Image (cartoon, rainbow, N blue to C red):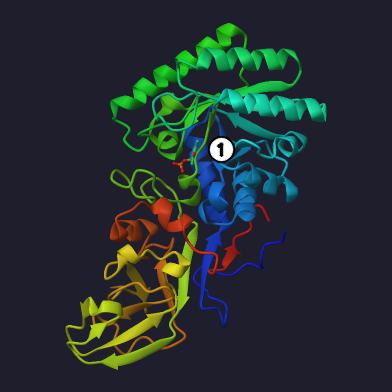
Amino acid sequence: MNVSPPVSGTELPAGLPSAAVVDLDAIAANVRVLREHAPKAQVMAVVKADAYGHGLLPAARAALAGGATWLGTAQLSEALALRAAGISAPALAWLTVPGDAYAEAIARHVDIGVSAGWALTEIAAAARDLGMPARVHLKADTGLNRNGCPPEDWPQLVEDALKLQAEGLISVVGGFSHLVSGDTPQAPVNRQQIDAFVAAVDLATAAGVRFEVRHLANSPATLTLPDTHFDLVRPGLAVYGLSPVPDRASAADLGLRPAMTVLGRVVNVKKVAAGQGVSYGHTYTTSTDTELAVVPLGYGDGVPRHASSAGPVQLAGRRFRVAGRVCMDQVVVDLADGGIGRVTAGDVAVLFGGAPGEPTAQDWADAAGTISYEIVTRLGGRVPRLYTGSAGR
Ligand SMILES: *Cc1c(COP(=O)(O)O)cnc(C)c1O
């Protein structure tokens, strides 16, 4: 699949109501920053959920161009989509379900995360049918209490895996776990999880497993907790240039460049008097005679309705706020604070982006009471992704 021709930073091609411009060079540069933070580990760029909304294939290729040597996904179908596009880098999918496409995964050299015995059974059956061993990474639950094998079941999972390995049905490639509070480096649970992970790895090693890669770190841990790095780190959010520790450091502080810029084209500008209610429910009232600009991005595009009367929008080089409710297809911006007479239909609004001074995905997260992960990942399919930069093309 080919990527559309490059566009420049805040350019919105004629006729488009909106777009998310993704800077592939920023993705590659962010991976280089992450490699510097974990110089002894390999980087697995996490590209689940359409690369956090950035576009699976272009983002994956850009991350590899930046020096990632592995790709990580949640669902198996996501890793298989990489293979279908000809991407052959080692890839791990860790959230598979009973009845999943294990035969295809094995045939396409996709590594499979295993958290429970049922998965080993299904994977071994597929490997037997195919006459080809599966590559698996055993996942230990070290305290998150989400997926992963709990400590009391770990010895049995290891024993079962070694038995299947001896039969030539699987190869145990990795051992891994996931952090509870990587974004709070000082939290005591981090040390507890590192210790629990080491214990799980030691138990497996003593039983005869030879892990090629042991991995625990997500983005915040890659940047702030060197003891979690082991052989491989699994950053997602930071690859896309967003801070995983926004209370402690901005993206810029961390040397990261936000890769995504969301643009909308102003469809209407009009004068309204002071005291007029704006948008559904009239939850916002103009405080002076003013102009309102309508931008065609709404919750149908992933703009959070919780950011009504709060989300920032840049127009004519100035920052304004959404006036009133975020609608399904559009938002209204009150230009009273320095924008009157400066904005016309056809102008391009920046909801958030990567350039200095622009509103950020973190600003939208703060406005909506969520995290920047959700702002970029929920960006809707109606917003075309356009690509700038050359990394991985
Ligand atoms: C999503 C995910 C990651 C990446 O997390 P970030 O905080 O985005 O870096 C790493 N490992 C697992 C298991 C994940 O589910």
Ligand 1 lies under 8 Å from the Cβ of mark 1: yes
Which residue type does callout 1 highlight? Leu
Which of these two is toward me, 45 or 331? Answer: 331
Residue 309 position within the rendered picture, expressed as x and y whole percent measured from the top left: 27, 71
Relative horizontal placement of residue 143, taking residue 156 as reference (left or right): left
Residue 154 position within the rendered picture, expressed as x and y whole percent measured from the top left: 51, 16
Question: Which residue corresponds to the image point at 38% horizontal and 82% vertical from the top-left?
Answer: 294
- Quadrant occupied by the N terminus: bottom right
Report which residue position mark 1 lands on. Answer: 95
Which of these two is toward me, 149 or 200? Answer: 149
Residue extending furthest toward the right: 131
Question: Which residue corresponds to the image point at 21% horizontal and 87% vertical from the top-left?
Answer: 276
Residue 361 position within the rendered picture, expressed as x and y whole percent measured from the top left: 39, 58
What secondary structure is marked by label 1? loop
Which quadrant of the view contains residue 193? top left
Question: Which residue corresponds to the image point at 42% horizontal and 51% vertical from the top-left?
Answer: 373
Relative horizontal placement of residue 58, taking residue 345 as reference (left or right): right
